[in-house]
Amino acid sequence: MKNLIDIKDLSVQEIDNLIKVANDIMKNPHNYLEKCKHKKLATLFFEPSTRTRLSFEAAMMELGGNVLGFSSASSSSTSKGESVSDTIQVVGYYADVIAMRHPKEGAPLVASMRTNVPIINAGDGGHNHPTQTLTDLLTISCEKERLDNLTIGLCGDLKFGRTVHSLITAMSRYKNIKFVLISPDELKIPEYVKEEILEKNSIEYLETNDIEEYMDMLDVLYMTRVQRERFFNEEDYLRLKDYYILNKSKLEKAKDDLCIMHPLPRVNEISTEVDDDPRACYFKQANYGKYIRMALILRLLDIK
């Protein structure tokens, strides 16, 4: 593996190996303090981010490496008209690995063709977010102690949600996985995801508008926000943004060991009263993200 552009770039064995390394980092952090000494990570974020960018930076620093980069397109030479291709070729001389977020789908793939430095896709439009998917897989693995025999509820924006599409793609490769797809009609999962992933792999799934209808079946509930930046029409966004709000009453029928996840940022879709519920895993999920990114950086730099 030279780059990580799409979660499909990784085999199940490679994912399992990254999870194994991440678990070892959590248990034995002192063994990794200087693994990336004298190595540099460039974070090129052409689109706003808090958790993803900071978790990459924290990951590299905890491995003993250094970080350079920018947090918005306006603070880079693209604001002067420089192409992404030129930016990548130049940064490739300064860094050992590049984490890149861009609003245009496919931009990280193009970038990977313009440099010999490993490229990590940190999100490209509504397309892919593979390190969030790795974060989600590590979270499920740690909280449920397995990645098979699970019923996973996905709730909210299933149309534009790149984290949802990537998670379905990844989890569909594990045994006995079922999905409950919870969304308003306007934000249903795209047909190509159903046809090319779920139906092609004979994955069992249900579609519903009601968040409580199948709550008692779920092992994992993955909430998502309705993303204002993906809407062309402000009126549609305002009508749908609060369609689902998870609160204590909606969890009354849920399993005691339900794992509630959210890729964050949260807006209104999970009430703060749920934060103290032991089943709430979304802040732990953000922490797991740092460890899986540490494991990924080590893998791409071929550091044992």
Image: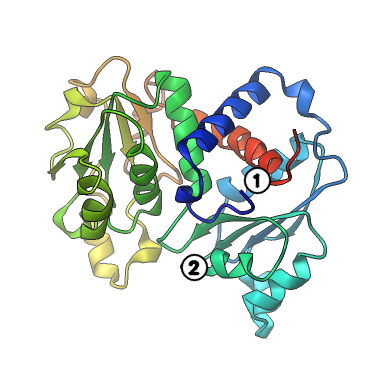
- Three-letter amino acid code at disc 1? Phe
Q: Which mark is residue 56?
A: 1
* Residue at the extreme top of the image, as rendered: 256
* Residue at the extreme bottom of the image, as rendered: 81
- Locate the C terminus by quadrant: top right
Direction from residue 245 to residue 52 in the image, left or right: right
Q: Earlier in the sequence, mark 2 or mark 1?
A: 1
Q: Which residue appears at 28% of the width and 40% of the height?
A: 154
Q: Which residue appears at 82% of the width and 65% of the height?
A: 93
Q: Which mark is residue 106?
A: 2
Q: Which residue appears at 18% of the width and 60% of the height?
A: 186
Measuring from the top left, give residue 241's x and y in whole percent.
28, 54
Measuring from the top left, give residue 116's x and y in whole percent.
72, 62
Residue 95 location, quadrant = bottom right
In the rendered view, would you say 249 is above or below 297? above
How far is the residue under mark 2 from the one under mark 1? 20 Å
In the rendered view, would you say 85 is above or below 156? below
The reply to whether residue 246 is visible in this rendering is no
Direction from residue 38 to residue 299 in the image, left or right: left
Colouring convention used in this rendered image of the protein: rainbow
- Three-letter amino acid code at disc 2? Gly
Mark whose residue sits in front, 2 or 1: 2
Q: Are marks 2 and 1 in contact (CB under 8 Å)?
A: no
Instruction: Look at the numbered disc 2 and give the secondary structure of its residue.
Output: loop
Front in this rendered view, residue 137 or 263: 137
Residue 212 location, quadrant = top left
Instruction: Using a 10 Å C-alpha cutoff, classify the residue at mark 2 as few (fewer than 14 neighbours), some (14 to 19) or many (20 or more).
Output: some
Direction from residue 110 to residue 164 in the image, left or right: left
Measuring from the top left, give residue 123's x and y in whole percent.
51, 57
Instruction: Using a 10 Å C-alpha cutoff, classify the residue at mark 1 as few (fewer than 14 neighbours), some (14 to 19) or many (20 or more).
Output: many
